[in-house]
Image: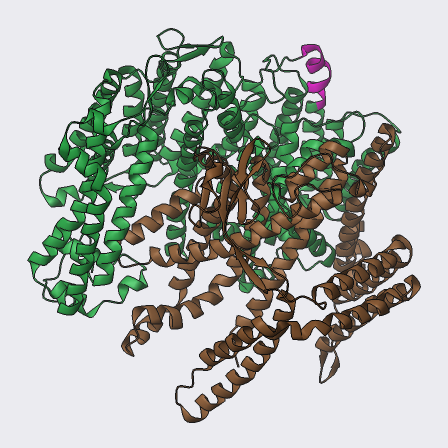
Amino acid sequence: MTVPMGDPAAAAVDPAEAWAAEPEPAQKPEEPSLSMGEWLGRNLFSSAVNSLLTVVFSLLVLLVVRGLLNFMFSEERTWRAVKTNMRFLFTHAYPQDQYARIWVCVGAIAVLSGLSIGLLARTGAGISVKKLSINLMGTGAVIAVGILLREPSAVVDGEGMALHRDLSAAAGDSFVDWLDANAFAVLGALLLANLALAVWFNFQGTYLRAATEPRIAHGVLVLASGGVLIVQQYATGEIVRESFADAMSDRAWWWLAVAVLAGAGAALWFGLGDARRRNTFVPAMYVFFVGAGVMVLSGWVYPWGHYAFLEGEFIAEPGSTVAMTTRLPWTVMWALLVGAFMLGRMLRAARAGPKLRVPLNLLWVLTPFVLYWAVLRDPDLDWDHVLSTDIPMAVFFAVFGGLVVWYLTHPRIGEAGRITAVVLVAVAVLNWVAAYFDWYAMLQKARISFLLLAVVALLAHHFAGDRSQRMKLVAAWVGTMAVLHWMVTLVNSPSTVETPTDALIGGFGITLIVAVFTLLLAFPMGVLLALARTSNLPIFRVLATGYIEVFRGVPLITLLFFFTLIFNLFLPQNMSLVDIAGATIGFALFSAAYLAENIRGGLQAVRRGQYEASDAVGLTTVQRTLFIVLPQALRVSIPPLVGQVIATFKETSLLAVVGIFDFLRIADKVISAQSEFLGVKREGLLFVSFIYWIFAYNMSKHSQRVEKRLGVGER
Amino acid sequence: MSNTDQTTLAATQSGRPPFYRDATVVKWLAQVFTLVLVVFALFFLTTQALENLNRQGIEIRYDFLGIGLGSDLREGIDTDPDTAGRALWAGAVNTIRISLGGIVAATILGVLVGVGRLSRNWIVSRMCSVFIETIRNIPLLVQIVFIWALVATLPNVELDQGPVNGLLHLSNKGVSVPRLHIDDGFYQWLIFLGIGWLVGSLVKRRQDRRHDATGRDTYPVASFVAVLAVFGLVGWFAHPVFGWVGAIFDFIGDGFSALTPPVVQVVLSLAALAAAAWWIRRFLARRRTPAGLMKLTDDDRFRIIFAGVGALAVIAFVLVGWPGLSSWIINSGTDLLEVIADKFGDGRTGKPVDIKAPDVEQLGNFPNPGPAGLNLTQGGTAVFLGVVLYTASFIAEIVRGGILAVPKGQTEAALAVGLRRVTMLRRVILPQAFRVILPPLGNQYLNLTKNTSLAIAVGYSDFVQVGQIVYNQTGKTLEVVSLWMLFYLACSLTISVVVNFFNIRMKIVER
């Protein structure tokens, strides 16, 4: 009844449990509510072994939590190092006076996300009020425990001398002394008592059949074990801490946070009164918006990061500080996100969803390019060249290609179409051969456009249709050309934003950018490789298999070294790749091999009948692959694909090894080399882990939800 | 338009479409075109590289492997290698060592956590899932660097701490634990164990048969272990009896060194041909039906051609591509046999295996963990713990998935016949889950091995890090990168072969 879903170990009900469970009246199936004692008995103390496990693991949890909290809240920690370097961690050396560009990017992403979520996300079930309030209060409790538990080891006084705590001298409290000295003896005694009790229960028959009192005694013992630890820590810690007013004032803020969290939780819990209303669900998005809003608001209340690191000086007073420069932008970002979400919901209500889905997806694909090359880089366009060469060439390819597409997609084009396509292919290949032998000069983008046109021409007859269909294809071609030529122009223009490193931006920015571009490059490659590997054409299959196995067989780091150190050797003399581009290619080639394997799994899940049916209605191979097989295969492989996205995101941390100033490298090498924070590493690393964790965890949770939904909805 | 229609019609009537619309022709054209493109791209890149190297006056040669290396390694079988090749070898051994140790440790931890996550005990299952969700969502590199920074905060090692401060020696220099030392008479003792294994298997089979015949409990596994233990015990003292085995290897070694390169070349070529012929024969046999040979598809023909061309390529390589190969085989084979002969040689009367405890010794101005224990430096500790925790979190999920994949009826049946929970898990659930678990587990082992290359971030002397030292000193980047890739490809191949072997053995034999 209380069994978590899909848990066979729990599903095999212990006889004692069944005995205990039977007489109870049938509960409401959605939310079986047990009393505290019942819940404990069922889940923690159902047998002697279980009780023992509970005790041991509770102690372990306490130790781990205490260690972690001590680590985080210890006065030894220099969290200042992280706060001061916040800007550095996220954008590295991006010039401060150009910072508005970064906010434009964040804003664009906020608006797009808000729109997409508002428009496309299903409302679904969210978080129940009950869970929400428990979580809030729990967070408050954890923080409270953290404040209580923090250990003031080696506090530094005014002259930089470490004040080691000397209990026997400072305390004067015999109980504290005694407790500190005998903490482990007490713990041991409690554990033994637990054991004895557990053994006794075992003789008595199973645990649940025993009377209530011994069980309560047992619970008290367990709590006492933890209590001893807490009291010991608190008591010993307090002695030293009292003399430090700083710590107290800092703690006051934390206590305020505890009060706010616990208060909000309690207000939710008791404000809604009865149990049924506590079980109502709030959409997760709203919870997120409110949470983010509170975070933003806290910037106006609490002096987050009132620190600046200017000209080697550490400045803790207001001025050009992180909090001052970011709280307004963050508030704007929040407003944009919520506003876009509302707009999305309105559009959804107006049933604009299906119409806007494609443009929105297109925008998502284009955004990284536009943001990186047009906004962050601020290209210095050579207008003469743009007007005299770039625009005419783009127009030429758009018009010429558009006509070709229009002509070739005629349903009754026949042999003429094939001949045209073959001629175009021949010319496109000739362009490249000519480039190799230096016969005639041509802009690289013209060659690429021509090749693209040739490929489109070869495939065109698969997409033949009526007027509107053909118009759409022509429009797609014109759009592609416009974007392609515009992008090439942007990439070729020098950047006005000057940074001391190769990469325009560093820190978390480069992590995100590399991850996004890696996936944009790797995904089409992965699809092609998967198709080739499952194809029945042997040469394609052998090539794809060889590629996949080789790239999966070598460590990513060697590939990165190859592409950042020596790939330039393999390029013609006048060409070279900067580190960051090389690394992105390395990541993309590596991810493509893994993506291909994931997609192959999806392709194999497409049933034979689908192929036979599409053959029976006379689809060509290209049509069958594009319209029948791939959509189904990709749908099936969404969960592993998301897994690969997470993996790629995590792998971007390897940038640090090949000498690019990414998030990890700054925390690991750069901050610990600053004269103020010499050797301060662990704080930064913990922060980096936390940021990575938030992103990866949320993605994996989301993919699990999608998986569940797909599993339910499947056939 | 009408003209083209007519030709199409004519072609259709003649039974076969024109060549440019013949599916077979177009298919092969496309494939050959792609192949040419790929080959050309590779050719282009290679020629560019050769040209660029020429311009810089660099040649691709591997003779730097014999050149001395100016720097020491932090740890490994040889911390002060004479040559770059020797250093790389030490690095490779470090990689293999940490990978194997990591695989064992990660498997144990992963299975424990995976089973723990399914525990009925709320706090146990919660802790296990928190462990998994935390570890697997943080990049491994971040974890390794973080553990490295944590190890740095451990207390200093001091001289008076030795020889043993407990069996575990933890300091900011790393970790030192006791180790088994393969001592003098180990290999002779191995012979005893081998014989014990054989005899034990015979005994086990006999006990099995008796069990099948009578239904009584005959303890087959226990008797196997007992026989092995008896042989081991006897061999512990009696192992010098086998001192003469070395002479046999000496004899074989003499015979091997008497071979001449042309003989080896011929043997290798014949072996390649025989392998290709065997493969093609087997392939054709599979296509044979009672009615005769089935029609071969394009694919089949391609495979046959591929096998033939492959064999020819091997022969060309052996005869022309690398003529030194055969003498290299003879030399290294002779060396290897000599080493083996020495190991099994006469006059080794010491204990087979010894246990050594950690100690502390003075190196320069600083005390360090001494060579007696099994040492992991700071970097080694970070890499080991990092890959073990990280891989364990993935293995735990795989184990959980595997256990959940066992039908519920199995659990119910096991409980119904009165098995205890632990026995049920060990005897009923895990063996069945193992089949589901094995393939993804193999992938994780592969990932673990590859992930040890992150050692470069914390300076553990693994193959990649040593490679970096080598190319920093010699400038032979291209060669070192090629060695990296070859080495890891070989590792991956080995692991997948081993996993596949077990996979095939574990398969349910169906009717």
Image coords of residue B213 (percent x, y): 45, 93
**In the rendered view, does B461 fall on the left or right side of B285?**
left
Q: What hue does chain A carry in this figure?
A: green
**In the rendered view, does B424 fall on the left or right side of A23?**
right
Residue A412 seen anywhere in this rendered image of the structure: no
Q: Quadrant of residue B331?
A: bottom right
Q: Quadrant of the C terminus of chain A?
A: bottom left
Magenta span has A424? no
Q: Residue at x 82, y 66 (%)?
A: B272
Nearest to the observer: residue A695 or residue A153: A153
Q: Quadrant of residue B253?
A: bottom right
Q: Residue at x 39, y 45 (%)?
A: B133
Residue B341 seen anywhere in this rendered image of the structure: yes
Q: Which residues are magenta?
A: A382-393
Judging from the image, what is the letter of the chain drawn in brown? B
Q: Quadrant of residue A290?
A: top left
